[in-house]
Image (cartoon, rainbow, N blue to C red):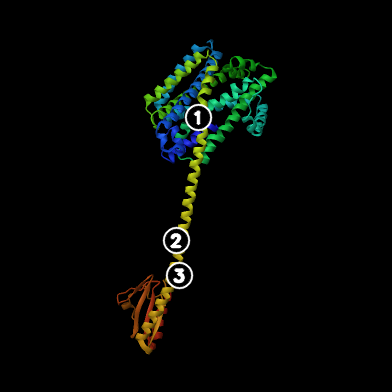
Amino acid sequence: MGAFSVVGLTLAFVQYRKNRPALISSAFYPILGSKTDGWMGKTIDLLAVISTCAGVATTFGLSAMQISGGVSFLTPLTNNIPLQLSIIAVITCLFLFSTIAGINKGIKRLTNLNLVFAGILLLFVLFAGPTITVLESMVTTLGGYLSNVVSMSFTMTPFSNDEWLGSNTIFFWAWHMSWSPFVGLFIARISKGRTIREFIAGVLLVPTLMAVVWFCVFGGTALNIEISGLFPLAEIAQSEVELTLFYMLQNLPFTTISSILAVIVVGIFFVTSADSAAFVLGSMTSNGLLNPSFKLKMLWGVLIAGTASVLLISGGGGLDALQTAALTAALPFAFILVFMLFSISIMIAKDWRTEQRKARLARDEELKQRLKKEAYEELRQDLSQEWRDELRRELLAAGRNTAEMIHFQTTEDTAIVGRTLAEIGFPPHVNVSAIERGDDVISPSGSTEIKAGDYLYILVKIQQKEALLAILRETKSGL
């Protein structure tokens, strides 16, 4: 899962954040720059294509062997190379029909259907087999894995001739690495709009937990059958590993139905893998085109099927040729995965610094605007007060000693609001000299309408002051 998530996250990041094409070489743009468009980028893409072909061909061969084992278990047909080649031919035809339907109708519908079938098979084995033992082994296995994952990751056998490590652990590591360009590109293709947190949860955590459940249910059931002496599954696994699943189901109820369901699950997985692989290889060999042509996808599907057939024939129908192909393809791509880790780290760190800089600039700008607004308000209030005092002095000087300056601010309830100065009917010798309305100062006339919030500067003879105040103090509610 780790190899898939590294490739998928790196490619999704460069595709949707950096607008680079859907190619493995695009992941190296932070390191190589424009050289990814030259021979170095082409070499990286070529290695990715070779790795993908070998990994998918290995899967085709293993799937064909698994289906062939199921067919030979359920029918009189013999589990041999002709049957396996026939299965590859049939699956290739089925995958072509899926390719015609496209991703949303073909791959998506088959995948959803296969999830239902696989879930039914999983629940059947869990509850038809030793349920308590399987659940206990699940907890024990998960705890043992978490406790020993680091040491097991570095375990080699330099002083013993142990072939198990090479044919199992290292083979599956290599197999996953050879699959990583294909799976990574496909995951990146369908991950647009997801956050990195959602991507990691969906690609790394959830599949890992599901793998633990799946292997514990099937492996725990098979191990229980072996230990209890019901059937020598270990001997079958040594001679014909593809039949092990079906002999395990033979020791559970409804053997025929469960075996047919297992063949269907493997067959649909075979079809969706072929369809997805052809889609990705078509994209990789058309300069990252997100929707490669049907002819190109069909060509790659046929080539992969042919490669798997050749490997089966050359390997005598066994695993040796398939394992060798996976290991050979994974070796050069392992170095590409390491450099991908550096590449995605560089891009995320650079984007994080950019986002931090933008956030800091936004905070600084917000602070500047707030301080600027506060300073402007303080200055406006100071100037307004100075202006009022100056106006008062000028008007009083104009009125000499026989006049007085009245300043009054209206409200919504003031009776004179909504009326013009001519309509109000102020007493004689009353002069509304100025009206301050917001930031504006108005020189009023008889047609000027008084509004709520107006600040009136009124010059009045001392003898008329009380009559003026009486008019100003009148309210609408009191009328």
Q: Picture coordinates of residue 405 (x, y %)? A: 39, 83
Q: Name the residue at 35% across, 80% down.
A: 432
| Vertical side of 325 occupied by 16: above or below | below
Query: Would residue 19 be seen by someone viewing this image from the given angle?
Result: yes
User: Given the image, on which type of amino acid does mark 2 rest?
Assistant: Gln
User: Which label was assigned to residue 180?
Assistant: 1
Q: Could you give the CA–CA distance between mark 2 and mark 3, rounded to whole angstroms?
A: 14 Å
Q: Picture coordinates of residue 380 (x, y %)? A: 42, 70
User: Given the image, on which type of amino acid does mark 1 rest?
Assistant: Ser
Q: Earlier in the sequence, mark 2 or mark 3?
A: 2
Q: Earlier in the sequence, mark 3 or mark 1?
A: 1
Q: Nearer the viewer, residue 156 or 121?
A: 156
Asked whether disc 3 touches disc 1, contact meaning CB atoms under 8 Å apart, the reply is: no
User: Given the image, on which type of amino acid does mark 3 rest?
Assistant: Glu
Image depth: mark 3 or mark 1 in front: 1
Query: Would residue 263 be seen by someone viewing this image from the given angle?
Result: no
Asked whether disc 2 touches disc 3, contact meaning CB atoms under 8 Å apart, the reply is: no
Q: Could you give the CA–CA distance between mark 3 and mark 1, rounded to whole angstroms?
A: 64 Å
Specify whether 442 is left or right of 138: left
User: Which label was assigned to residue 378?
Assistant: 3
The N terminus is located in which quarter? top right
| Vertical side of 235 occupied by 440: above or below | below
The C terminus is located in which quarter? bottom left
Q: Earlier in the sequence, mark 2 or mark 1?
A: 1
Q: Nearer the viewer, residue 196 or 25?
A: 25
Q: Picture coordinates of residue 446 (x, y %)? A: 30, 77
